[in-house]
Image (tube, rainbow, N blue to C red):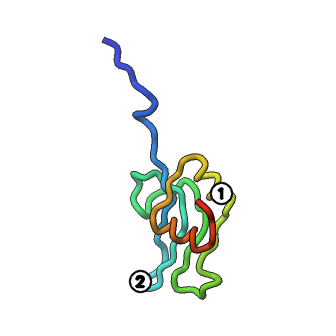
C-alpha cells in the first residue's frame, strides 16, 4: 500500500509577534517573525523592529515597513498586539 503525503500537511504557520527582552519591570520587545510553534522567546526567523513601551511616544516603535509588508504578502499573520502596534504607526494591513 502506498502512502501519499501532501505538502499541505507540512505547511508551517508563520507569525509576526513580540519577543521579550529587558530586565524586570523594564521590558522591551523585538518584533520578529517566528514559526507559530516556537515559544515566545524562541528562535526567530527574522527581526523586523523594536517596541519600547516605556520610552517616549516618538521613540517607542521602530520597524522595517518593507520587510513587514514582504512577510505579510508571504502569508505571515500578525499577533493582535503587533497588529495594534502597526495600526498605531498608520501601517495598513
- Which residue is drawn at the image coordinates 57% and 69% (left, top)? 87
Secondary element at tag 1: helix
Q: Where residue 37 sits: x, y (%)?
A: 39, 51
Disc 2 crowd, CA 10 A, few/some/many (<14, 14-19, 20+): few
Q: Where residue 65 sits: x, y (%)?
A: 67, 62
Instruction: Determine the residue located farthest toward the right in the rendered image.
Output: 66
Q: Is residue 31 above or below residue 54?
A: above
The circle on residue 67 is: 1
Q: Is residue 39 above or below residue 56?
A: above
Return the residue nearer the eye: 14 or 87: 87
Q: Where residue 79 sits: x, y (%)?
A: 46, 62
Q: Which residue is mark 2?
A: 24
Q: Where residue 93 sits: x, y (%)?
A: 58, 59
State left or right for residue 48 relative to residue 82.
Answer: right
- Which residue is drawn at the image coordinates 42% and 63% (left, top)? 40
- Which residue is drawn at the image coordinates 62% and 73% (left, top)? 89
Mark 2 vs mark 1: in front: 1
Q: Earlier in the sequence, mark 2 or mark 1?
A: 2
- Assess whether mark 1 and mark 2 are in contact (beta carbons under 8 angstroms): no
Q: Is residue 52 above or below residue 49?
A: below
Disc 1 crowd, CA 10 A, few/some/many (<14, 14-19, 20+): some
Secondary element at tag 2: loop
Kindly report the distance in space between the C-alpha atoms of the residues bearing marks 2 and 1: 30 Å
Amino acid at each position: 500500500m502506498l502512502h501519499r503525503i501532501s505538502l499541505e500537511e507540512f505547511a508551517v504557520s508563520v507569525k509576526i509577534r513580540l519577543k521579550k527582552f529587558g530586565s524586570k519591570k523594564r521590558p522591551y520587545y523585538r518584533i520578529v517573525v517566528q514559526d507559530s510553534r516556537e515559544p515566545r522567546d524562541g528562535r526567530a526567523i527574522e527581526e523586523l523592529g523594536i517596541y519600547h513601551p516605556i520610552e517616549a511616544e516618538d521613540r517607542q516603535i521602530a520597524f522595517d515597513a518593507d520587510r513587514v509588508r514582504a512577510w505579510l504578502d508571504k502569508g505571515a499573520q500578525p499577533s493582535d498586539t503587533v497588529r495594534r502596534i502597526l495600526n498605531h504607526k498608520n501601517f495598513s494591513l
